[in-house]
Image (cartoon, helix red, strand yellow):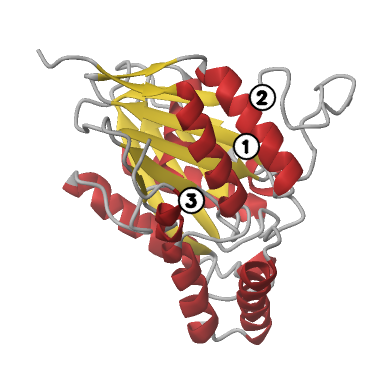
Amino acid sequence: MAAMQVIQADFLGKVSYLMLQHASKVLPPGVEEAIRRAAAEEPNSKGKAYLEAMVRNMEVSRARGVPLCQDTGVPMFYLDLPPALAVEGDVRAELEEATRKATRDAPLRQQVTHPLTNVNSGDNVGWGAPPIFVNYNNRIDYLELLAVPRGGGAEIKSSAVVPIPGAPKESTILKTVLDAVAMAGGENCSPNIVGVAVGGFGIDFTEYLARRAIYREPLNSRHEDPQVAALEEKLFRAVNNLGIGPLGVGGKTTCLGLHMEIAGCHSAVFPIAVSFYCWSARFSRARIYPDGRVQFVTHPELNKEFPHGT
């Protein structure tokens, strides 16, 4: 058994702060490339105009160092940990402080509120925010951190269902996804990245998988299971064939990418979740190695900030 190695929580906080700031202003390269390609290829004149405006939006945001969208999102964190690596210190406290600092410095809009009173915390921290998800991954030897400033427009159109036992699998999945996209009607700030999850025991886990599926890279890459990959491709084409287009004005670009995840489930349960991310699909991924090296995956321009790790 390998000796346990340790990363300090305060270092994790420093990396997270930088990631949140940058993610709010610069899209991952795959997302930016997909939007530029869509703008060049969209035949619908209204849809093309909106896509070209999105391209200008990205360029202005990068040039001026300002957030991509007025809805700068609620920060969320996903940590993947390998078996022989631990984090020493108060992870929640450090990620909360990173959120406070990014809210002040990016700046991020102050939008975490109490669900009943609408009292605003003033710093995007409070009542369980920011949410932190931890996954133990025995296929990696580094800590992977995903920082996501997730906006509300796409989230409110996400959905989950539990069809009746015995429902035909593929046609039910297809109908569920297309119904969700059609009901959103572009109000989820399309073109979207669509995350789909099937299976899992407990609809909360299915929803988690659908949201995680959104952040798969490369964008629109296919699942390792050939059956799932074939269904992903069928869903991707079907969604774009709806003709909803950018922001619902029409066109062939409703979806920039569609990723599907599966999980084992009870034989009597068949949950399906659909999660959306808006065109401004902001997230930042970094890997922290046991020796303190940091690799910024989505935003390699940040690697200079930690040239020698800790």
Which label sits in the foreground, 3 or 2?
A: 2
Residue at image point 53% right, 25% down: 132
Front residue of 148/299: it is 299
Mark 3 is surrounded, within 10 Å at the Cα level, by few (under 14), some (14 to 19) or many (20 or more) other residues, namely many
Residue underneath mark 1: 75
Front residue of 53/271: it is 53
Which secondary structure, mark 1? strand
Residue at image point 57% right, 63% down: 191
Q: Quadrant of the N terminus?
A: top left
- The percent position of residue 77, horizontal first and vertical second, equals 52, 32
Q: Quadrant of residue 73?
A: top right
- Marks 1 & 2, CB-CB < 8 Å contact: yes
Q: CA distance from mark 1 to mark 2?
A: 8 Å
Q: Is residue 165 visible in the rendered structure shown here? A: no
Asked if 136 appears above or below 110 in the picture, the reply is: above
Q: Amino acid at mark 3?
A: Val
Q: Is residue 216 left or right of residue 3?
A: right
Q: Is residue 159 left or right of residue 261?
A: right
Asked if 86 appears above or below 123 in the picture, the reply is: above
Q: Is residue 129 left or right of residue 290?
A: right
Which label sits in the foreground, 1 or 3?
A: 1
- The percent position of residue 294, horizontal first and vertical second, equals 35, 43
Figure disc tally: 3
Residue underneath mark 2: 129
